């Protein structure tokens, strides 16, 4: 008996050692993947100048928090969490690289969180593959290098996914603390997601669309509703109905203070917004962007990418047939935001790839299961190398050819030609913000005016120029010798070209210089 006990203990020690070794190896691989993700997200992060939306993020976040909230409700369409975090971040600087570093940090942290989500539902191999797919995804690299809220949105959604996965795993005395953390984390992460972007409302909707029937099935089954699944998938167990309802109530209570602002912003979006109605091509383009954004211009590349990723998704769907509950969860998390934004867009278009960025995670998960299901290690390695090759082409295209509005070059050009008394006229009014970010170093005292109104005087983010605004503009430039028109986003704010027409009536065009995303035009009195 003692011999058997000794042998049993030795076998247990060997198993523990092997398990510890596997954990250490997985941790090393995850560390390497995360470092790669960090490198891709900080590479040349300050090389491109800030564009309009990024400069607006800085302008908004510089305000004291009470004023920031007031401005958000009056002129913006986004919740306050990202701006509030950036407000603290700006205490240490406001260079292009630094303000974008907040997004790079969020994008990098998403990688281990995403790993933990997939690992909770399966095993190390598919989790590492999923983390790698996310790490090299050009779409995510791009928004980890942008001073906007989309990388934070993805991180908050990924934490929500992780907490849902923890809640769905069977509770045992050994993981009681983890389960408790999962419940608290679900509430906090869901609220954080809702306070990062208003379209994230589709996240709790998606989770509940899965959980409601899943809990119902549990209540109808005598065996506790543990899904029929085999390794490497974790068993999924529906949570208690009472606990789930309490968690949803907590989410609503914590989000409730923002609800009135959400309604007011939604009314503003419904009244006027620039996004065009989605088409089938829009959906196709969004999925292509998820797979490999910034594809080279060769017409064959989309076909190659669709074939490659389509095959991976098909393999993943086949592999996941052994865990129908997990497959249903991933499909609902992906399809709900797509269908939701499409349905809303039937009345007011809001379908936009960047607001759907978190919906790429379940797609990457399905693809990762497809790769992990390949039985031969050399074949898995070949697929991962092919994936890396495809994404390397796209990342090269992003780093070297993707352009943002060139406010930096425009400000430098105008500064070299500026004369005392020149008027700076902005057509879209809020384009004054990115221009001033760079021009402040030259002539901060220069007079700035807007058409149809000065910056935010009308309480509208993007006021449109109309014929009724022309007399004010004529009076504004009537006694000016020189007027610089900083002209951008005119397709939306001045589609009839009323501003150049009014300037041409009273002054002569002496200089015109195009920069990416904008134009500079110098109008002055005709020389005698």
Image (tube, rainbow, N blue to C red):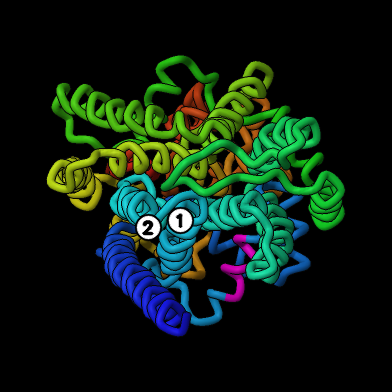
- Residue at mark 2: 124
Residue highlighted by disc 1: 119
Taking 317 as reference, is 338 left or right?
A: right
Which of the image's four quarters has the C terminus?
top left
- Label 2–label 1 contact, CB within 8 A: yes
Task: Tell me the magenta residue range.
Answer: 82-88
Look at the numbered disc 1 and give the secondary structure of its residue.
Answer: helix
Image check: 171 left or right of 342?
right
At a point 73% along the width and 42% down the height, the residue shown is: 224
Q: Is residue 425 visible?
A: no
* Mark 2 residue element: helix
Q: Quadrant of residue 82?
A: bottom right
Query: Is 83 colored magenta in this rendering?
Result: yes
Residue 265, x across and y down, in percent:
74, 41
In the image, is residue 400 part of the stretch drawn in magenta? no
Q: Nearer the viewer, residue 472 or 379?
A: 379
- Measure how far apart labels 2 and 1 are at the Cα level: 6 Å
Viewer-proximal residue, 213 or 206? 213
Seen from the viewer's position, the closer of residues 61 and 41 is: 41
Measuring from the top left, give residue 456's x and y in whole percent.
Answer: 67, 49
Residue drawn at (52%, 29%) of the image: 492
Tell me the residue at 66%/45% (across/down): 237
Mark before the other along the chain sequence, 2 or 1: 1
256 w.r.t. 354: above or below: below
- Based on the displayed image, in which of its 4 quarters is residue 292 positioned? top left
Whether residue 483 is visible here, answered yes or no, is yes
Percent x, y for residue 299?
A: 16, 22
Residue 367 in percent (x, y) is at 35, 38
């Amino acid at each position: 008996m003692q011999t058997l006990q000794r042998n049993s203990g030795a076998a247990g020690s060997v198993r523990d050692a092997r398990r510890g070794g596997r954990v250490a190896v997985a941790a090393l691989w995850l560390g390497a993947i995360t470092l790669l993700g960090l490198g891709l997200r900080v590479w040349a992060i300050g090389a491109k100048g800030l564009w309009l939306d990024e400069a607006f993020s800085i302008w908004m976040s510089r305000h004291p928090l009470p004023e920031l909230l007031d401005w958000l409700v009056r002129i913006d369409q986004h919740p306050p969490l990202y701006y509030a975090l950036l407000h603290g971040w700006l205490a240490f600087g406001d260079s292009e690289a630094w303000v974008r570093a907040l997004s790079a940090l969020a994008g990098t942290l998403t990688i281990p969180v995403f790993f933990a989500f997939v690992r909770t539902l399966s095993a190390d191999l598919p989790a590492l593959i999923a983390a790698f797919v996310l790490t090299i995804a050009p779409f995510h690299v791009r928004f980890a290098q942008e001073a906007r809220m989309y990388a934070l949105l993805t991180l908050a959604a990924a934490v929500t996914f992780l907490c849902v996965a923890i809640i769905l795993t069977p509770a045992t005395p050994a993981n009681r603390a983890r389960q408790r953390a999962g419940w608290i984390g679900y509430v906090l992460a869901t609220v954080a997601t809702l306070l990062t972007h208003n379209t994230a409302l589709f996240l709790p909707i998606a989770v509940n669309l899965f959980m409601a029937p899943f809990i119902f099935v549990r209540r109808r089954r005598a065996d506790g509703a543990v899904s029929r699944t085999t390794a490497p998938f974790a068993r999924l167990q529906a949570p208690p109905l009472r606990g789930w309802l309490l968690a949803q109530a907590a989410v609503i209570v914590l989000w409730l203070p923002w609800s009135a602002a959400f309604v007011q912003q939604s009314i503003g979006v419904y009244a006027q917004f620039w996004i065009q109605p989605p088409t089938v091509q829009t959906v196709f383009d969004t999925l292509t962007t998820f797979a490999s954004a910034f594809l080279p211009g060769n017409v064959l590349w989309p076909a190659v990418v669709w074939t490659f990723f389509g095959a991976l998704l098909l393999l993943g769907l086949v592999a996941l047939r052994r865990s129908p509950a997990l497959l249903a969860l991933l499909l609902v998390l992906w399809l709900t935001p797509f269908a939701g934004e499409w349905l809303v867009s039937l009345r007011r278009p809001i379908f936009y790839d960047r607001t759907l960025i978190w919906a790429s995670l379940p797609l990457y998960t399905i693809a990762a299961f497809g790769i992990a299901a390949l039985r031969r290690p050399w074949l898995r390695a070949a697929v991962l190398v092919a994936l890396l090759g495809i994404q390397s082409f796209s990342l090269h295209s992003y780093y070297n050819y993707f352009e943002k509005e060139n406010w930096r070059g425009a400000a430098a050009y105008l500064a070299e030609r500026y004369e005392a008394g020149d008027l700076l006229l902005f057509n879209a009014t809020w384009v004054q913000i990115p221009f001033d970010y760079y021009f402040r170093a030259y002539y901060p005292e220069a007079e700035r005016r807007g058409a149809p109104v000065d910056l935010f005087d009308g309480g509208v983010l993007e006021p449109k120029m109309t014929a009724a605004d022309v007399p004010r503009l004529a009076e504004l430039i009537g006694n000016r010798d020189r007027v610089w028109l900083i002209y951008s986003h005119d397709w939306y704010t001045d589609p009839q070209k009323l501003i150049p027409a009014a300037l041409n009536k009273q002054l002569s065009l002496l200089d015109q210089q195009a920069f990416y995303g904008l134009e500079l035009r110098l109008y002055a009195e005709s020389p005698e």
